[in-house]
């Protein structure tokens, strides 16, 4: 579950980064228009970099569409990750039962590990005895 939570957090971070990129794109590449007759578009000085790099309207719309699709895709990935988290479709009793089953599996695996360690120690003792016997002769 920890891995899924990490994936969810990383996906959320990526979504926020994509939101920022979309806002920056819109702010940086929109066309300069006046909203009222009193609005003024300032003239740029020669050494001043432009605040807006206006794109062709079709290119601007295509960029917005691509950014929107990326946002939707990332949001769908996040929804999928959330749906795979445990507990959404399981009651507390079901979750406790799953925990008990996992504890039993862990106990059985630990018992097998202990038996394997004993077997390893016995084999090492026998091997050590054989090596000592060979050295004597």
Image (tube, grey):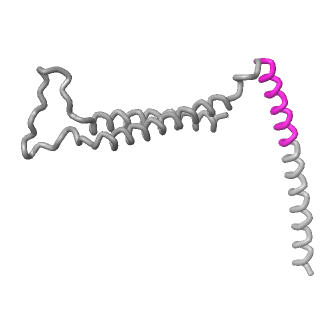
What are the residue bounds of the magenta stretch? Answer: 92-110
Furthest residue in direction left, as rendered: 45
Q: Position of residue 98 (x, y in %)?
A: 81, 28
21 sits to left or right of 114 = left
Could you tell me which residue is drawn at 28 percent across and 34 percent down?
Answer: 27
Q: Give coordinates of residue 20: x percent, y percent.
A: 37, 34
Q: Position of residue 77 (x, y in %)?
A: 58, 36
- Quarter of the picture holding the C terminus: bottom right
Residue displayed at 76% across by 22% down = 90
| Residue 99 appears left or right of 128 | left
Q: Is residue 65 magenta?
A: no
Return the x and y of residue 13 as percentages of the image width and height.
Answer: 47, 35
Q: Residue furthest top?
A: 92
- Residue 43 versus residue 62: which sits nearer the camera? 62
Question: To which quarter of the image does residue 45 belong?
Answer: top left
What's the residue at 89%, 48% (across, down)?
115
Magenta stretch: helix, strand or loop mostly:
helix
Q: Of 120 and 54, which appears nearest the observer?
A: 54
* Residue at 27% from the left image edge and 43% from the top image edge: 55
């Amino acid at each position: 579950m920890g891995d899924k939570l990490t994936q969810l957090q990383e996906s959320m971070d990526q979504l926020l980064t994509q939101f920022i990129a979309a806002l920056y794109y819109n702010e940086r590449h929109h066309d300069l228009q006046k909203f009222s007759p009193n609005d003024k578009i300032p003239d740029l000085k020669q050494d001043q970099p432009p605040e807006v790099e206006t794109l062709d309207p079709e290119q601007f719309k295509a960029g917005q569409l691509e950014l929107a699709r990326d946002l939707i895709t990332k949001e769908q990935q996040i929804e999928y990750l959330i749906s795979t988290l445990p507990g959404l479709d399981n009651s507390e009793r079901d979750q406790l039962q799953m925990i008990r089953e996992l504890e039993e599996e862990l106990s059985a695996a630990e018992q097998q590990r202990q038996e394997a360690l004993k077997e390893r120690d016995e084999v090492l003792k026998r091997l050590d005895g054989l090596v000592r016997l060979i050295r004597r002769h």
